Each structure stands twice: as C-alpha cells, then as structure tokens.
Amino acid sequence: MKIAPSLLSADFGNLERDVRACEAGGADVLHVDVMDGHFVPPITFGPVVMQALKRITNLPLDVHLMVTNADHQAEQFAAEGASWISIHAEVCPHLHRSLNNIRSLGCRAGVVLNPVTPLSFAMEAAEAADFVLLMSVNPGYGGQSFIPSFLRRCETLRSWLDANGLSHVEIEVDGGIKIGNVKDVVNAGASILVSDSGLMHGDIAASIKAMREAV
Ligand code: DX5
Ligand code: ZN
C-alpha cells in the first residue's frame, strides 16, 4: 500500500516546507496534478514546477496528466524527472502507443479512467500499463465527494487483472480519499491512495501517519 499526497492544496509559497512534511509523514510518492484548462477547467503546474520539485526531493513524482495533449506533455514531464506518468483514456485514442512511449522514457506508465468510463478501456490497455488510476471523483478539483461506485469498479478490475495474469498492475485511487474510507478502498483492491484535502491541511505528517494506521 502506497500513500501519495497530492500537492494540489500545498502552499505554493512554501512548497518545500510541505514536501518535507510529506517526507516526514512517510509518503511513498508525491502526486502531481497537472491540469491544462482544456481537459479540466483549472490550470495548475507546468514542467518548470516539476523541475523545482525534483531538486528538493528524492520521493518519486507521480504525474497525473489531466491534459488533452498528453503525449507531448508526457515527454516534457519525463524530461524534468517524473517517475510515474498517467494519462486519461478519454483523450488518448492510441493508448498502447502512448503508454509504451511513457515506458520508453523511463517512467512507470498509468492509464486513468473517469468514474463513468467503461473498465474495458483499462482492460484492453492493461498489458502496456504498470498501474490503472481509477478516479473516484470527476477530475479537476480537490475536495469533492467520493463516488461510491468506485468500490464496485475497483473490485471488478482487481479480479479481472488477477485472473488475466496481470496481478502486477496496481490500482491507484484518486478523489475524496479520507481516513474514513481508506480501509474500504484497500479492501476493494486499491494499493496506491491519492489524497489532497484528506492530508494537506493542518499537520500533514501526522495525517499521513494516521491514514496509514487507518488501513
Ligand atoms: C482531482 C485530482 C486529485 C485531487 C484529489 O482532479 O486528480 O488528485 O487533488 O483531491 P481530494 O483528495 O481532495 O479529493
Ligand atoms: Zn490526481
């Protein structure tokens, strides 16, 4: 089980302080939400921020690309030190090519599905992926409510992956993850837990430790 705090609610005037707090809490990876103002309304980080993050931490950087031009941006973020890159099936029509390209850049490749996107998109592409990110909210904003159908979707996908020789493909969950529901999502088969509003306000290190204990 890996905990991936999202930097979406980090204090950008004190980014290093918040990254240190994530490290102190035992975060396994830092989740970097890249939004382009097209695929989702807000605009967040570009590769220059990634470059700065890379200078201050050795934690793997998990780049969630909520962008329409994912192939191009994957190359930019890989060049700045991303360790994991995930791309949305809804805007990537050539998933095998895109995922293979991310792997060839030296990164772990993930395919992301919005809450209503059929699981078959991930199943068909799973051989080219290292992880599947199942959204448990519609992407674009932190602080939204967990959509309960995630649990059924996650159980179905986990069983399918295990039954098809793809046990090594991890499931990441993103959206509305809090101490109160982490046990349920892990029981459903998720092994990478993204959380922004559940961790990044108040004492970040203590919240990460509490989340791990809750699981
Ligand atoms: C949503 C982003 C998430 C977001 C999660 O579009 O992909 O990573 O930061 O925020 P919370 O944990 O507050 O739902
Ligand atoms: Zn995300």
Image (cartoon, rainbow, N blue to C red):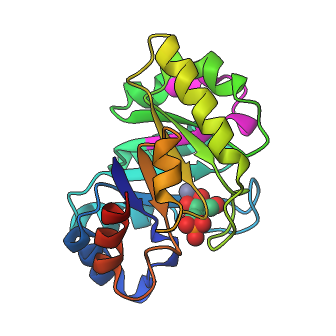
124 versus 185 height, above or below: above
Q: Is residue 200 left or right of residue 208?
A: right
Residue 114 vs residue 148, the one in the foreground: 148
Name the residue rendered at 69%, 32% in the picture. 92
Image: magenta residue range: 85-99
Image location (x, y in percent) of residue 173? 54, 49
Q: Quadrant of ligand 1?
A: bottom right
Image location (x, y in percent) of residue 84? 40, 42
Q: Is residue 21 left or right of residue 85?
A: left
Residue 183 vs residue 161, the one in the foreground: 183
Magenta span contains residue 73: no
Q: Is residue 113 left or right of residue 130?
A: right
92 versus 100 height, above or below: below
Residue 175 picture quarter: bottom right
| Viewport quadrant of the C terminus | bottom left
Q: Is residue 21 left or right of residue 5?
A: left
Image location (x, y in percent) of residue 22? 29, 71
